[in-house]
Image: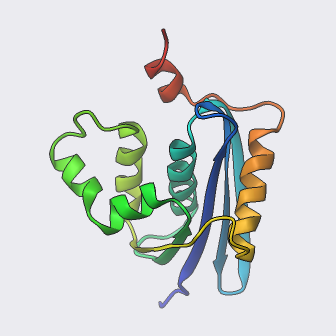
Amino acid sequence: MTRSPITIYTDGACSGNPGPGGFGVVMNCAGLEKVISAGYRCTTNNRMELLAVITGLEAIRWEKAEVVVWSDSSYVVDAVEKGWVFGWESKGFVKKANEDLWRRFLTVFRKHNVSFRWIRGHNGHPQNERCDRLAVAAAAGPDLLTDEEYENMNKQ
């Protein structure tokens, strides 16, 4: 059975860096749309950008999906498209930030055929702007989640 390709738009936001943060995801497949967002009480922008991608990929209900991820995060797009994350992995992520999320990303990334497209942020692209609004609203929302790995790693 041939399945339709999936397009995922993502964005992360942080009020302060670190500070309260959130992410927004808009997924499209065969005319259907799924929207996901969440906010965290203390995190970083890069963590939210990466968590947005992870959350979108984890929401796919089958394996071997054809996926295009659109992100304004050079951190995420370049790490994958330029192969850096695979080098970090082969060296055990020594002295690399966000190891927990990168490991989680690689697990779900390998279940699908994923390509990335970088898009300039805050440049009027409707889906990117929508994801930004979702991320900012999530970061400002009530009952923020705890980014446990980040908070535990940064306890003084």
Q: How is the image coloured?
A: rainbow
- Residue drawn 76% across and 66% down? 130
Horizontally, residue 1 falls left or right of residue 44, namely left
The quarter holding residue 114 reads bottom left
Position of residue 47 measured from the top left corner of the image (x, y, whole percent)? 51, 43
Task: Say which of 64 and 86 sits in front.
Answer: 86
Q: How many marks?
A: 0
Residue at image x 57%, y 46%? 48
Q: Is residue 110 visible?
A: no
* Residue 102 makes an appearance in the image: yes
Q: Nearer the viewer, residue 89 or 12?
A: 12
Picture quadrant where residue 107 is located? bottom left
Left or right of 78? Residue 136 is: right
Where residue 97 appears, as percent x and y from the top left, is 37, 37
What residue is drawn where x is 54% and y is 49%?
51
Q: Residue furthest left?
A: 91
- Determine whether 112 is above or below 21 in the image: below
Which residue is most to the right? 142
Q: Residue furthest front?
A: 123
Please determine whether, in this image, residue 22 is positioned above or below residue 147. below
Relative height, residue 155 to residue 7 (above, below): above
Is residue 136 or residue 7 the one in the foreground?
Answer: 136
In the rendered structure, the answer to whether residue 91 lies left or right of residue 27 reads left
Q: What residue do we see at 15% from left, 43% from top? A: 91
Q: Position of residue 125 (x, y in %)?
A: 70, 76
Outermost residue toward the top in this view: 156
Q: Position of residue 28 (x, y in %)?
A: 66, 77
